[in-house]
């Protein structure tokens, strides 16, 4: 992955990009990309923030694993909510309802 600027509303998906993004929504999206990529056994940069993750190979079992990882981090998440709109951007919006990006990022660190 290059260090070129990213479009607004997108995540970099790398540790360096996460540090640059700080604790904003982009950092949450990058953290979700890392978790989801680990579950799917792909690289985080292979998951575009707006890509339908089901079309990328994410199944119901993998969604349950992502939910489990989020819950272990102390973040309330449900399979139904993630499966309804399976994109990293939508998941970020969902996680940021009622929580700050800094709080979510700290829990996912």
Image (spheres, rainbow, N blue to C red):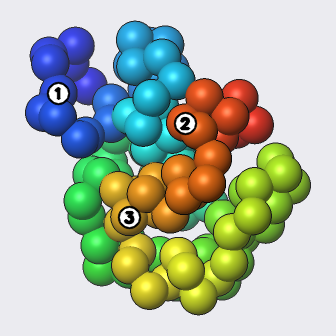
Q: Which residue lies at the image location 54% right of the left edge and 58% below the top edge?
A: 97
Q: Residues within 10 Å of mark 1 (few under 14, many from 20)?
A: few
Dot 2 corresponds to which residue?
A: 101
Q: Which residue lies at the image location 68% right of the left edge and 78% below the top edge?
A: 78
- What is the tally of numbered marks visible in this picture? 3
Relative to residue 41, is residue 65 drawn left or right?
Answer: right
Q: Nearer the viewer, mark 3 or mark 1?
A: 3
Dot 3 corresponds to which residue?
A: 90
Closer-to-camera residue (75/1): 75
Q: Residues within 10 Å of mark 2 (few under 14, many from 20)?
A: many
Could you say which quadrant of the image residue 17 lies in? top left
First along the sequence among labels 2 and 1: 1
- Check if mark 3's residue and mark 1's residue have beta carbons within 8 Å: no
| Residue 99, horizontal then vertical, whole percent | 63, 47
Q: Which residue lies at the image location 17% right of the left edge and 34% below the top edge?
A: 8
Q: Nearer the viewer, mark 3 or mark 2?
A: 2
| Residue 48, horizontal then vertical, whole percent | 27, 51
Secondary structure under badge 2? helix
Secondary structure under badge 3? helix
Dot 1 corresponds to which residue?
A: 6
User: Relative to residue 86, is residue 32 depicted above or below?
Assistant: above
Q: Residues within 10 Å of mark 3 (few under 14, many from 20)?
A: some
Could you say which quadrant of the image residue 44 lies in? top left
Q: What is the distance, in whole Å, between disc 3 and disc 1 at their CAs?
A: 18 Å
Specify whether residue 36 is in view. no
Specify whether residue 73 is in view. yes
In the picture, which quadrant includes the N terminus? top left
Secondary structure under badge 1? loop
- Check if mark 3's residue and mark 2's residue have beta carbons within 8 Å: no
Per the rendering, the mark at residue 60 is none
Relative to residue 25, is residue 79 drawn left or right?
Answer: right
Q: Which residue lies at the image location 14% right of the left edge and 16% below the top edge?
A: 4
């Amino acid at each position: 992955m290059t260090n070129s600027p990213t479009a607004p509303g997108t995540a970099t998906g790398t540790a360096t990009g996460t540090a640059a993004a700080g604790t904003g929504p982009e950092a949450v999206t990058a953290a979700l990309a890392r978790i989801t990529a680990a579950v799917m056994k792909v690289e985080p940069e292979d998951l575009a923030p707006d890509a339908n993750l089901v079309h990328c190979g994410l199944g119901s079992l993998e969604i349950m694993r992502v939910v489990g990882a989020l819950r272990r981090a102390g973040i309330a998440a449900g399979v139904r909510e993630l499966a309804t709109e399976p994109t990293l951007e939508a998941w970020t919006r969902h996680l940021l309802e009622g929580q700050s990006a800094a709080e979510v990022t700290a829990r996912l660190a």
